[in-house]
Structure formats: structure tokens, C-alpha cells
Amino acid sequence: MFNSKKIAGTGRVKCWRSKPNCTAQAAFRGREMSKKRYPRFFGFLALFCMLLLSGCDGVPLLDPKGQVGIEQRNLIVIATLLMLIVVIPVILMTLIFAWKYRATNKAAKYTPDWSHSTKIEIAVWGVPMLLLVFLGYYTYVSTHELDPYRPLESDVKPVTIQAVSVDWKWIFIYPEYNIATVNKIVFPANTPINFQVTSDSVMNSLFIPGLGGQIYAMAGMHTKLHLIANEVHEFNGISANYSGAGFTGMKFKANSVSQADFDNWITEVRNSPKKLGQTEYAELLKPSERNPVELFSAVTPNLFQIIIDKYEGMNPGKKLVAGEKETASNEGAEKSKNSAAGAEE
């Protein structure tokens, strides 16, 4: 026989021998209090998760505006889901087994001599093998279709943009229009963009997350990247490879606009008083951080190739341009002459 009394400020129930069913009453009250606490806990947990997920809005990689970016996003999502087919059951079984075979569960079946199950072997080996075959095939096909050097199929004539990485800014040259910009590009929507990329400094990387993948920029080398924007939009471009103190501010704007707006922008740039000659380019080569947008109405002819040829010694197997061939020929003739003179002596 028990009696109970609630202890003030503690939520606990004190029992003493006097009346029956005291233990049952205390347990019932304890369960009621637990029911009140748990919904509140899960409510706070749900609210916390919502706050975390609210920061995922507008992630360019998961919400691309270009066809290349969409295909890359699909590859990431499909590959992740396929791997979760294996990962999720493993996590669930770990939790289930830990609970079912806990030390206090006396009803759990104990089989110390068990060593083999054909069904388990088929599941453990068969499912991952099938997933690997499908994932390997899908990744192989997608990798070749999304090759950055592969031109995009389109009935529209592409726009060529030559990108040069310097410390710590991006120089963009439009060879077809003989104009250039710093830290900003504009191009028509639904028009392929052919990027030609190099560096006049350390190794870097051109990346517009909302459009597609990145490509490295290296001195003395010419890399390619083909992208397209499916709609009018303002994209953020970044440097995706650490390049020194000003790396974090090495950003640029990439705007996809209508064809009419693109033509108007070309006219605006051509009206700029600035011209990108050798002197102006030498100034841009000086290290500087967070540079403002600059527009140049004219560019030194073949500036992009001139920048690459500066590092000719890094690539001795590369064919020389006409002027360099003549220089090399003269140097070779002089060396032969000196050798012949030495032999006569």
C-alpha cells in the first residue's frame, strides 16, 4: 500500500506505503510529463532544421541557368542518389542491430556459430556491383558529353571571349569586336560562349557556378571552356584556384542579356575613351585587389596570343610564330658559323 505526493518544483512523485496503485499512478504521471516534453523538443528540432535549410536557397550549383550546368547538376544528383541506396540501409541496419542486440534485450536470438547466408551475400555483393556498373556507364557518358573542350551544338553563332588571369583581376577580350573589359563580361542568352583561357601570372581557374564547370588558366597555355545561358540572368564569376593575397576578391560579373541589349552594350564599350595597348596592359599586370570594372574600346591586335608567346620557353615543342622562326633561324645560322670556324681552327 503506497501513497504519493508531488514534490514542488521538481516534477517528481514521492511515494510511501499507505494506498494501493501508487506506483502505477507515479508511472502514469511520468509518462504524461514525457509526452509534454518530447513534442516541444521535436518542434525546436524542426525549426532549427528549417533555419539551416533556408540558407540553401539560390545555390548556383543546384539551381543553374545554363544547359551545361543543368547536366552537371543532374550528374551530381543521380550519382548521390545511387550511392544512398547503399549508404542509407547500412546506417539504418547499424541502428537497428545496436538496439535489437543490446545487452538488456534477453529475447534477442544468440547464434554464435552462424557464419554464412546466401541471401545476405547476394544482397551485399550484388546490389553494389549493379550500382557500380550503372554509375560507371552513366559517369563515362556524361564526362565525354560535358567535356569543356567540346563545342556546344547550336544554330546560333557562338561568341568568343578570351580570358586572361592576372594578379588579382580578370581581363576579358572580345576578338570579334576588338574590345576588352576588366572583371565583367556580357553575352547574349541562348548563345554558345567559347572561352579561351590563359594566365599572365600564377595558375588560376575560371569558374561561373551558375553556368557550368571551371577550367584552369596557366601561363603559356591555352585552355577552352564552352558554356551557354538558357535565360537572361546575372551570374557571379570567381577564381576557383588560390593565387595569392588578393584571391578572395578576384570576382567578376557575367551577365546574359537579350541580343538587343548585347548590341547596345557593345556600342557602349566602343564609346569608352580607354584603349588597351601595351602601356595600359602593363599597368593591369601590376598586382591590385578588388579592381572596379573597366571598359576598353580597342585592343592591341593578337594580344591574347602575345601573352601566351611570352612563355614560349615553357613549351619548347610548340610551333613558333613567324617572327620567332626568323629569330631562331638567325640564331641557328650564327651557331653553325661559329662551329664551322672552330672546326677550321
Image (spheres, rainbow, N blue to C red):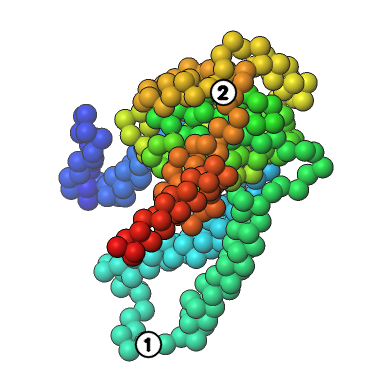
The reply to whether residue 323 is in sight is yes
- For the point 41% across and 42% down, which residue is it? 203
Residue furthest front in the image: 345
Element marked by disc 1: loop
Q: Identify which residue, 91 or 193, lies in the foreground.
A: 193
Residue 34 lies left or right of residue 146; in this view the side is: left
- For the point 33% across and 34% down, which residue is it? 244
- For the point 29% across and 45% down, which residue is it? 26
Residue 58 lies left or right of residue 288; in this view the side is: right
Position in image of residue 111 (x %, y %): 34, 84
1 vs 2, front mark: 2
Element marked by disc 2: strand
Q: Quadrant of residue 108?
A: bottom left
Q: Mark 2 belongs to which amino acid? A: Thr
Residue assigned mark 2 = 181
Residue 116, compared with residue 251, is above or below; it is below
Question: How much space separates mark 1 and mark 2, taking CA atoms?
Answer: 70 Å
Residue assigned mark 1 = 115
**Sequence-wise first label, 1 or 2:** 1
The reply to whether residue 210 is in sight is no
Q: Residues within 10 Å of mark 2 (few under 14, many from 20)?
A: many
Q: Mark 1 belongs to which amino acid? A: Ser
Q: Identify which residue, 162 or 138, lies in the foreground.
A: 162
Residue 238 lies left or right of residue 225; in this view the side is: left
